[in-house]
Image: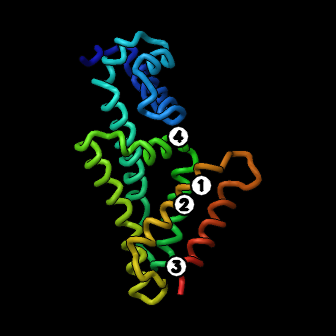
């Protein structure tokens, strides 16, 4: 049931999502109970059902929300230019988008197995849409003789896995700045696909 206007739902709803994201990332979806999420938020367990029908809906909301935000941000960028310029833009975008969201990235990649089939299909469709954007860049570069990618699908998956992996080790305030990390990843990707 929706909360009435003027209630604390605009505050508590996001807190429920943040708590669930943190706990799912730390302990795994299967190990976290609604009671634990409620305790993290500071509400009674029954109150959570004002914000989500169940734990599966909460997981799906987090994962779909991550992909929706990613695709919206990607589509807001200019998509023109040479394949090389487009690939660099993709690399820098992917690193910049994912670096500040390590928990969201972890849950989005590690908890796919816990989505119900219908929810999995929706999230997978969104993931493929994003992958297709990179694959198109690689295909265009290969056709233009700029890149050497015999199998653009495998190259796409490899590049995305490499770029996403930055969230497992990067920490703000570390040895390298975000820009320096982005520069190094762009150099590695460029060397991997260029003729």
User: Which is more N-terminal, label 3 or label 1?
Assistant: 1
Q: Is 134 rendered above or below residue 39? A: below
Q: Regarding mark 3 in the picture, which secondary structure is present there?
A: helix
Residue at position x 27%, y 42% from top? 119
Q: Which residue is mark 3?
A: 193
Q: What's the mark number on residue 83?
A: none
Q: Is residue 191 above or below residue 120?
A: below
Task: Report the residue marked by disc 2.
Answer: 163
Answer with mark 1 or mark 4, whichever residue precedes in sequence: 4
> At x 34% / y 36%, what residue is drawn?
61
Q: CB atoms at circles 2 and 1 under 8 Å apart?
A: yes
Name the secondary structure under disc 1: helix
- In percent of width and height, residue 91 lies at 53, 65
Which residue does the numbered mark 4 point to in the structure image? 103
Q: How is the image coloured?
A: rainbow
Q: Which quadrant holds residue 33?
A: top left
Give the spatial CA distance, label 4 vs label 2.
15 Å
Task: State the residue position of label 1.
Answer: 166
Q: Label 3 crowding class (10 Å Cα cut-off): few <14, some 14-19, many 20+?
A: many
Side of 59 relative to 189 (left or right): left
Q: Quadrant of residue 117?
A: top left
Q: Describe the element under mark 4 as helix, strand or loop.
A: helix
- Quadrant (top left, top right, bottom left, bottom right) of the N terminus: top left
Question: Disc 1, disc 4: CB below 8 Å?
Answer: no
Q: Position of residue 34 (x, y in %)?
A: 40, 20
Q: Give the spatial CA distance, label 1 vs label 3.
A: 19 Å
């Amino acid at each position: 049931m929706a909360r009435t206007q003027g209630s604390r739902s605009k505050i508590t709803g996001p807190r429920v999502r943040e708590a669930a994201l943190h706990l799912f990332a730390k302990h795994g979806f299967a190990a976290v109970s609604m009671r634990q999420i409620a305790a993290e938020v500071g509400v009674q367990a029954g109150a959570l059902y004002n914000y989500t029908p169940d734990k599966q809906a909460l997981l799906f909301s987090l994962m779909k929300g991550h992909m929706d935000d990613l695709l919206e941000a990607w589509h807001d960028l200019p998509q023109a230019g040479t394949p090389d310029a487009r690939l660099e833009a993709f690399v820098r975008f992917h690193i910049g988008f994912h670096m500040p969201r390590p928990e969201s990235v972890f849950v989005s990649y590690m908890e796919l197995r816990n989505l119900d089939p219908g929810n999995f299909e929706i999230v997978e469709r969104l993931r493929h849409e994003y992958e297709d954007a990179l694959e198109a860049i690689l295909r265009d570069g290969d056709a233009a003789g700029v890149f050497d990618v015999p199998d653009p699908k495998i190259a796409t998956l490899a590049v995305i896995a490499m770029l996403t992996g930055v969230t497992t080790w990067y920490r703000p305030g570390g040895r390298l700045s975000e820009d320096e990390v982005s520069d190094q990843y762009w150099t590695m990707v460029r060397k991997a696909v260029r003729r």
